[in-house]
Amino acid sequence: MSTKKVFVGLTAVTSVSIFLLHSYHFSWGSHHRSHYSTVSPRSSSPPEPHPRRKQTAVVFLKTHKTAGSTVQNILFRFAERHDLTVALPGGVCSYQNHQFCYPRPFSRLFVHPLTRPSRIVASHLRPGLSELRSLVPPDATFVTIVREPASMFESLFSYYGQHSVSFRNAPNRSIGAFLSRPTAYYRPGERFAMFARNSLLFDLGGDPNRDPGDRAYLRDFILGLESVFSLVMVAEHFDESLVLLRRLLAWDLEDVTYVRLNARSEASRARLTGDLPDQARQWNWLDAQLYQHFNATLWAKLGALGPESLRRELGLLRQANGRLARDCFGVAGPGPPPALQASQIQDKELRPWQPGGRVSILGYELPRNLSLPPSLATSCLRLITPEVSYSRRLLMKAAVRARLQRRNRPGLGNRPDWEGD
Ligand SMILES: *[C@@H]1O[C@H](CO)[C@@H](O)[C@H](O)[C@H]1NC(C)=O
Ligand SMILES: *[C@@H]1O[C@H](CO)[C@@H](O)[C@H](O)[C@H]1NC(C)=O
Ligand SMILES: *[C@@H]1O[C@H](CO)[C@@H](O)[C@H](O)[C@H]1NC(C)=O
């Protein structure tokens, strides 16, 4: 589907649903908190005497330009291996096959009926927390990920430079020009403005245009997040975050191995220098505060784990990733498999979506000269399947499963008791 079509669709839908967009000012905190105050965050605990059962109900709130695609791929593969229903977009926003009508506040109507109720949620959405809760079992674990705001902003600027009106307004599409006078180019209501200021806070359900001096707002917002999310990962400390995720969910090492997805080519990256990182943090002040808070929280949890355990678990994870790179790609050394430009990738299904302009998003292909046993080849393919293809694939699988269920158990529904309200 062409990008243009997507945008036309988005405009059409958003304009008929202005009322929904009013919950722009929705927050997890303050008045909503009372509903959720019974949900206490699970802390990273010391090793448990008995192995717990794997947690198989997980909501990953995917944020933009934060390594979220890599986490999503981990969850999609886990879901396939354990035969779990993944919530997939469908129905209302049929022009989006990989996100839930973002940036409209989430409703379960955005979820394809064949994938409701769900055990895994990992595609872009903007909360709607109570709707999200009604989609998954009551004991589902909520996690999300944040990224350092200056590098996040650089990434957003380059990825959405063509699309966000605010970014397009800047002379020469220059990030320096934008950051020198952001208020001259940024208009809150404009198309894709959500990527141009405090994008992280927006994705988590907050109001990106809140007065940065409103400390109570931010404090309540963070408290609200903490009551919902058992773990907030940090992109800069990705492997450390996965160590905590694995412990939280009682998953195996193999369940969290990964290849980094949706990364830009080196040539598409700009390094912010001079005053620019500070200006970016200043402009995204709310995000900067969120980041500081959750990075500190992450390191407090890692501290509780102890340096020895952390070192050991990081070593195990990196070894497991190395084995994967060797088995799937024939990589000899310790490093990751070589990433390719989309044009170098023969299999269309493996080409990641390209945002346009001069930005190149890299992907992978399995080496042709490596003959893998079929089951290994399949799991290697999933590891490098980009979000859009993977979502389509999972939906096809859900359709097949539904057909089989209907044939085998006519008249018998399979609505577990948490569905329905
Ligand atoms: C835009 O680019 C042109 C050509 O490189 C340069 O002459 C001009 O000064 C730039 N404008 C701004 C505002 O940076
Ligand atoms: C996150 O916090 C840790 C511990 O204080 C610090 O060492 C690290 O530099 C921080 N990460 C970033 C990217 O700021
Ligand atoms: C496969 O081809 C790549 C280069 O295309 C080469 O580096 C690698 O050694 C080859 N592997 C095998 C097993 O022949």
Image: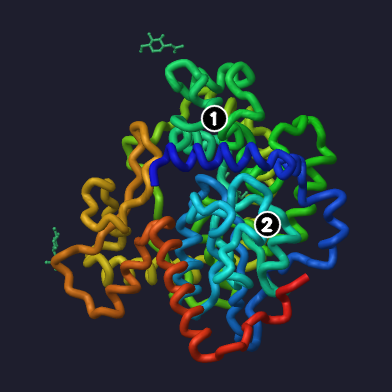
Q: Is residue 81 toward the left or the right of residue 112 in the image?
A: left
Q: Is residue 304 toward the left or the right of residue 99 in the image?
A: right
What is the x, y in percent for residue 6? Answer: 47, 42
| C-alpha distance separating marks 2 and 1 | 36 Å
User: Which residue position holds label 1?
Assistant: 277
Residue 89 sits in which quadrant? Answer: bottom right
Give the residue at x 52% y 84%. Answer: 406
Give the residue at x 27% y 69%. Answer: 328
User: Which residue position holds label 2?
Assistant: 107
Q: Nearer the viewer, residue 43 or 404?
A: 404
Task: Choose mark 2 or mark 1, whichever is in front.
Answer: 2
Q: Nearer the viewer, residue 198 or 325?
A: 198
The figure's colour scheme reads: rainbow
What is the x, y in percent for residue 13? Answer: 60, 43
What is the x, y in percent for residue 4? Answer: 43, 37
Give the residue at x 66% y 61%. Answer: 108
| Secondary structure beneath label 1 | helix
What amino acid type is highlighted by mark number 1?
A: Pro
Give the mark, 2 or 1, whose residue is nearer the N terminus. 2
User: Can see residue 199?
Assistant: yes
User: Can see residue 282?
Assistant: no
Bin the neighbour count of mark 1 within 10 Å (Cα to Cα): few under 14, some 14-19, many 20 and up: some
